[in-house]
């Protein structure tokens, strides 16, 4: 007997109402985690900084966002990707209809 067909994920669709940023783990393993992140117009809380123990490679699939680092801001548009090394402090300054894939590893 053949296994069922794979499920299709609609990665760029945002729900009509998104009261908070939504993070879904798509797949994970011993040394990695792949997240699908929906962020309609959310930002990190004031004075909050991510300081993650692992590296993060992120691609913005749709929308726009501004990431803030201690050294300044990086503006992102759909299709942009970047690598954030472990313990590189960062935060989301602004986002608009942002859909991300984020790979945490190492």
Image (spheres, rainbow, N blue to C red):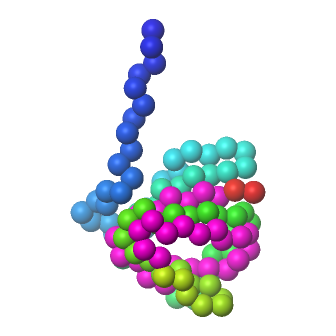
Q: Which residue is depicted at the point 60% across and 57% down? A: 103
> Visible in this render: residue 14?
yes
Magenta residue span: 76-104
Q: On screen, 1 above or below 53?
A: above
Name which residue lies at 50% across and 58% down: 101
Residue 43 visible somewhere in the drawing: no
Choose between 72 and 93: the one closer to the eye. 72
- Residue at the image position 64 percent from the left and 68 percent from the top: 83
Residue 88: in magenta span: yes
Number of numbered callouts drawn: 0
Give the quarter of the image for residue 19. Answer: bottom left
**Could you tell me residue 73's position as x and y percent?**
55, 87
In the displayed structure image, the side of residue 4 where residue 56 appears, left or right: right
Above or below residue 48? Residue 98 is above
Tell me where residue 30 sits by quadrant. top right
Q: Residue furthest top?
A: 1
Name the residue: 49% across, 69% down. 80
């Amino acid at each position: 007997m053949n296994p069922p067909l794979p499920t299709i994920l609609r990665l760029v669709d945002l729900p009509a109402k998104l009261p908070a940023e939504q993070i879904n783990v798509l797949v994970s393993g011993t040394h990695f985690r792949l997240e699908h992140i929906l962020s309609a117009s959310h930002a990190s809380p004031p004075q909050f900084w991510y300081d993650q123990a692992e590296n993060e490679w992120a691609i913005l699939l749709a929308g726009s966002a501004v990431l803030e680092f201690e050294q300044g801001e990086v503006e992102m548009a759909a299709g942009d990707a970047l690598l954030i090394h472990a313990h590189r402090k960062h935060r989301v300054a602004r986002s608009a209809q942002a859909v991300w894939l984020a790979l945490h590893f190492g």
